């Protein structure tokens, strides 16, 4: 490497890394990767209940344009974050489900959101291998300052800043590519999620009932007041 460096000791190439929070947008093939997996699960009935989290949406078309921008501009080097302004790109799963239902009314999109504590119990129990407790906590409290884009300093302009359109374009492309018919191809089962949620609720209900029978007339609130 040293023999190919210039007089200042710098290598004869530039290095720029592109990062983005939650990418979504139209599919090019029927193979659904992590970015659009949540929409795919909603479309195919694999997610009967919504998880109460929020996401900072970035359109994959702008992510692709950002890569090209850094390759062709000739001066970028460093770490860059591709993300619309936080106030314009944050969606809850309930909003995402509503947008998908608007675009594809016949889709078996979930209508109800599970309670926060049930979701937390499922995550802690390792129900979803794609989400650990830290990731869940981050998504519950919303994106932090790390998702503020610095691409503007490079003269980059976003073209896809409407999260509703990004989500709907993703859903419509999956429908056109036949992803909705592949309900069992990617695994997952509505019954399994219902069973896990019901089990958590049942355990808590049993504990609360036993406690009420053994110590009638007491509650957590009354204990706090007494102390």
Image (tube, grey):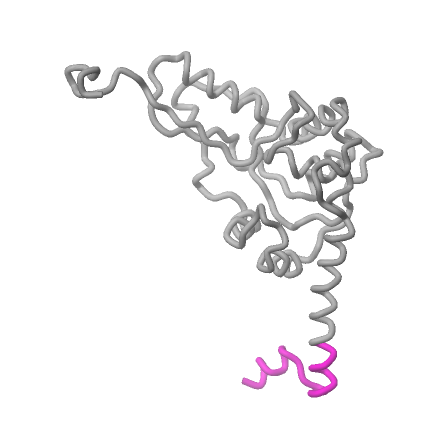
Which quadrant of the structure image shows residue 95?
top right
Q: Is residue 52 above or below residue 162?
A: below
Give the left or right position of residue 53, taking residue 67 as reference. right
Relative depth, front residue between 107 and 181: 181
Q: Is residue 19 visible?
A: yes
Tell me the residue at 57%/25% (across/down): 60
Picture coordinates of residue 51, whole percent (x, y): 66, 49
Picture coordinates of residue 111, whole percent (x, y): 78, 46
What is the quadrant of the N terminus in the image? Answer: top left
Residue 192 within the segment the image draws in magenta: no
- Which residue of the protein is positioned furthest toward the right in this rendering? 106
Relative depth, front residue between 129 and 54: 129
Q: Is residue 208 above or below residue 213?
A: above
The secondary structure that most of the magenta stretch takes on is helix
Which quadrant of the structure image shows residue 114?
bottom right
Q: Which residues are magenta?
A: 208-227
Picture coordinates of residue 195, whole percent (x, y): 75, 58
Tell me the residue at 52%/36% (across/down): 21
């Amino acid at each position: 490497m040293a023999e190919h460096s210039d007089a200042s000791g710098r290598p004869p190439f530039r290095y720029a890394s592109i990062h983005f929070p939650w990418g979504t947008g139209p599919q090019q093939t029927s193979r659904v990767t992590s970015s659009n997996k949540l929409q795919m699960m909603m479309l195919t009935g694999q997610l009967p209940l919504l998880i109460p989290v929020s996401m900072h949406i970035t359109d994959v078309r702008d992510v692709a344009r950002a890569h090209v921008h850094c390759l062709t501009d000739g001066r970028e080097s460093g770490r860059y974050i591709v993300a619309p302004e936080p106030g314009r790109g944050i969606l809850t799963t309930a909003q995402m489900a509503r947008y998908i239902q608007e675009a594809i009314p016949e889709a078996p999109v979930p209508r109800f959101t599970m309670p926060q504590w049930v979701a937390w119990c499922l995550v802690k129990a390792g129900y979803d291998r794609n989400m650990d407790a830290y990731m869940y906590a981050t998504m519950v409290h919303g994106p932090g300052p790390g998702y503020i884009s610095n691409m503007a300093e490079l003269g980059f302009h976003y073209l896809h800043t409407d999260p509703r359109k990004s989500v709907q374009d993703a859903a419509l492309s999956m429908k056109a590519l036949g992803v909705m018919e592949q309900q069992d191809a990617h695994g997952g089962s509505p019954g399994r999620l219902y069973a896990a949620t019901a089990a958590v609720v049942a355990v808590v209900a049993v504990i609360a009932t036993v406690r009420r029978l053994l110590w009638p007339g007491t509650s957590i609130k009354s204990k706090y007041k007494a102390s």
